[in-house]
Amino acid sequence: MSDLLKIPNFFLAFLVCVLVSCGLIGGYETGGGIVEGKLNVHLVPHSHDDVGWLKTVDQYFVGSNNSIQGACVENVLDSVVTALLRDPNRKFIFAEMAFFRRWWLLQSVKIQALVKKLVSAGQLEFVNGGWCMHDEAASHYIDMIDQTTLGHSLIKLNFNVTPRAGWQIDPFGHSAVQAYLLGAEVILDFWLLLFDLVEYFILVNERLGHYSPPDGFSFEVSEDFEPVQDNPLLFDMNVEKRVNDFINAAVTQANVTRTNHIMWTMGEDFRYQYAESWFKQMDKLIHYVNKDGRVNALYSSPSVYADAKFASNISWPLKTDDYFPYADGGNSYWTGYFTSRPALKGYIRSLSGYYVAARQLEYLTGRRSKGPNTFSLGDALGIAQHHDAVTGTAKQHTTNDYQKRLAIGAHEAETVVNSALSCLTTSTSNCTIPTSTFTQCPLLNISYCPPAENIPSGKSLVIVAYNPLGWNRTDVIRIPVKDANLVVQDNEGNMIEAQFIEFNIVTSNLRSFYTQAYLGILPQDVPKYWLLFQASVPPLGWNTYFITQTTSKGGYVSMVETPQNDDIEIGPGSLKMLFSLNSGQLKRITNSRTGIDLPAQQSYLWYGSSDENQPSGAYIFHPNGSPPMVVSRSVPIKVIRGPLVDEVHQQFNPWIYQVTRLYKDKEHAEFEFIIGEIPTDDSLGKEVITRITADMSTNKVFYTDSNGRDFLKRVRDYREDWPLQVTQPIAGNYYPLNLGMYTRDDKVEMSVLVDRATGGASINDGQMEIMFHRRMLHDDGRGVGEALDETVCNTTTCQGLAIHGNYYMSVDTVGSGSRWRRTTGQEIYSPLLLAFTHENQEDYKASHSTRSTTMDPNYSLPPNVALITLQELEDGSVLLRLAHLYEANEDVDLSTLVKVELKKLFAQKMIKTIRETSLSANQDKSAIKRRPWKVEDRSGPEPSTVRGGPVDPSALVVELGPMEIRTFILQV
Ligand SMILES: [Zn+2]
């Protein structure tokens, strides 16, 4: 029993009364808000909760695996709610809805009601409000929009509020597209707030460190801090000292911040395990600091802070490019994570495109509220955009968890797609009893596709190709088959040209190792050929192809050619590539249609990873200073020709294999590569690139995309905003790629597109290099605590992860490359979706619609517009997003205002109502009020951008200006 409790009751009552009247117990004055004329210190309580990093998202939520990191988000939310309920002046912000949903679903109706009150009172504020705090370098803009929409819909549904503030505090750099998305999502405060935060961050990084409070003001229960001690009955009273500490820290920050409002980010990673510990100290500090009167402290939030900044009515610098690459030291450029874990990045990207297609099909046949739907794929993809997920900077076991979630979501979405396609292709008007059972081949990446490999006799392999794009397309389909005694027929039964190409040994080995690793099986038969044929598919529609056994060869069987002289020219169409037989090197690229004739080479190299003085790792790319190793100066060349495609096969070294393809009807080259396992028996980490060198004068300039959208100009060894001191001539010139990169001189543009997030650079004029794979033996000291050394195991052995991917190259006359980049970029993002079944061809044709579009048959979307979302929401309404694909002045004809006719897009449905919304679809567009922030050095009004006008609900024509994305909710 304490001494206090021995005091007689009447005396205790008297004492308490005295203390309360002094404001010392339970009576701290914390509700004064902003005081004009004083320095206002906005205390913003927050907990930065990574949606997976050192632990998995679920482990972080429940607080398991605490030996790795003591972190439990359930504790954070439980204790924050209790602490907020104790005092209505207290505030807290929360960002990651993937966590919040986990917690919310566990709460009683009573707690939920209390939390709703906290939200409506502004005590608990959702900031960002996406599923996670997405990365800004390696995420695609469609994924960024989708994951934000998912979080915002949860907030809207349960709280009827729309987040006002952006809160991107931990991503490793900031993108230009992020600023656009924030501006379009909510009120435009967001974007200026973003820059405001960036201003803040620069200060933070210079002086304070991270998004934590100033030194000495972090109050986590497990930490060693100096509490404010104001109880005269106890020793160590320190109110005056702590008030002085507070004021000193505030003044230091105010000296380098505009306006008399500064923000203290009162939190850190996974803080507020016991929230009262923080709030107790902040209550006292606010009370005593304000009593002192030199500065004013208040509980605040980013929106309160932004309001105060806006009210200051001063001008702000405007930044229109981005904050990449980020570095925290001369040798520490965070440019490795642009490429880290390329298999995960590839999986995320392929499922991102698949999610777009699956939601279209789900909408076309009706979303199921129970049973399989596309939610779990959206959930998994939302989590995967986190700045430790798609970045490749999580621990291996967490990465496995991300992949498992993606696989579960994809599997469920496959069921949706299979049944939707059965339904859509069934001739009868209702599809309660679909007549076909489709399957898909998600493992085509390892050349494994059982329905194509085993066609039962008497039946055909029926391939339904669905086109998620809004325009007609012609693509070559490739499937592995047992033999060449197969014919291909189109939907009307006409024979079409088929080309067979022999399976190569590298592909076979990859297939057998990875089927064992992924499926635990070793298929007995190895396919002998790839069967290729050209498919033409209408927009938002499908076409059907039949593969049937015959007694003799059913198409052109490509043979390996024996070249006669040193110059080997390949290409069945107007684009040709010239190789040297002796060196195996690419020598030039020509296009008979455009007249281009460009000397060019392509090679593979690797950088040795630094293992000391800042090792290269998951985050950081730090080459060891030696010139990159050319893997092979002389590469044997194997040429295969045919009516549809010519191929050049090259084994660059024992672990790099490449096939260069030129198609009959495409004016670009496709490169398929298999890289791995990267050997490390020499104890040297390796970071593998391809380098394309052309005879071009590019004057240090190249262009890389921002989140797959705008292209930003990059100048080697130069930053527009400050004098760059070049400490890392390679790593410091790397930029993130999601769509691709290009460079140009006064005659030609040379462009490369990629199939996943990666990093690229132009280290010498006329050159572009792209990093495809990295394997290192050391941790880079930024927290993950593991070397990025990915391995895959079958039942008997483990080997370094191999990466199988594609990149694409085009050479165009100057000014005309954007059409290729934009159109082909969409085709890469949204490949034809293939579904397979085995049926008798005539029976199938008699009972199915074999070729159709869901749009008006005479309509297609304009070439500068992409349908990025078509989705049935839970309430039965339809979410539609259209994106203009071109920037202003990017293309002479296509960078213009364009119209989309919704009546033709929705030819089979009647649009009853249409409502334009914010980008994340959580409020009417008309409710969004832009605040006129003042911009420095701008005399006139804001430069005008072309934007589409309001949509007439009877005409239903949507206009889009360059780079505009418009979002609608329809009732159909
Ligand atoms: Zn983080």
Image (cartoon, rainbow, N blue to C red):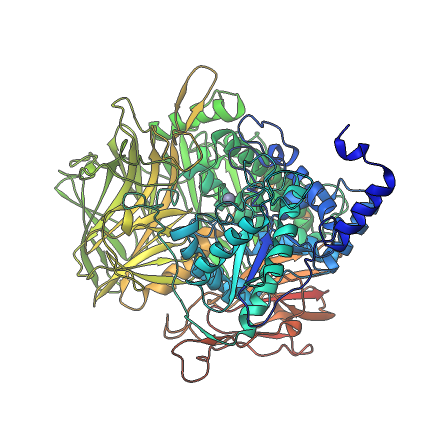
Q: Can residue 529 be seen in this view?
A: yes
Q: Relative to 627, does residue 457 appear above or below in the rendering?
A: above
Residue drawn at x 76%, y 55% is 21
Q: Can residue 168 be seen in this view?
A: no
What x and y, as percent, mark residue 426? 69, 49
What x and y, as percent, mark residue 213? 52, 49
Camera-nearest residue between 606 and 241: 241
Residue drawn at x 74%, y 70% is 912
| Residue 171 horizontal side relative to residue 41, left or right | left
Camera-nearest residue between 101 and 209: 209
Camera-nearest residue between 358 and 590: 358
Q: In which quarter of the image is the N terminus?
A: top right
| Residue 917 horizontal side relative to residue 825, left or right | right
Residue drawn at x 51%, y 29% is 397
Q: Relative to 577, does residue 964 appear above or below in the rendering?
A: below
Q: Relative to 905, does residue 54 appear above or below in the rendering?
A: above
What x and y, as percent, mark residue 551? 46, 31
What x and y, as percent, mark residue 310? 54, 72
Quarter occupied by residue 725: bottom left
Camera-nearest residue between 88 and 693: 88
Q: Residue furthest top?
A: 796
Q: Residue furthest bottom?
A: 940
Q: Quadrant of the C terminus?
A: bottom right
| Residue 100 horizontal side relative to residue 462, left or right | right
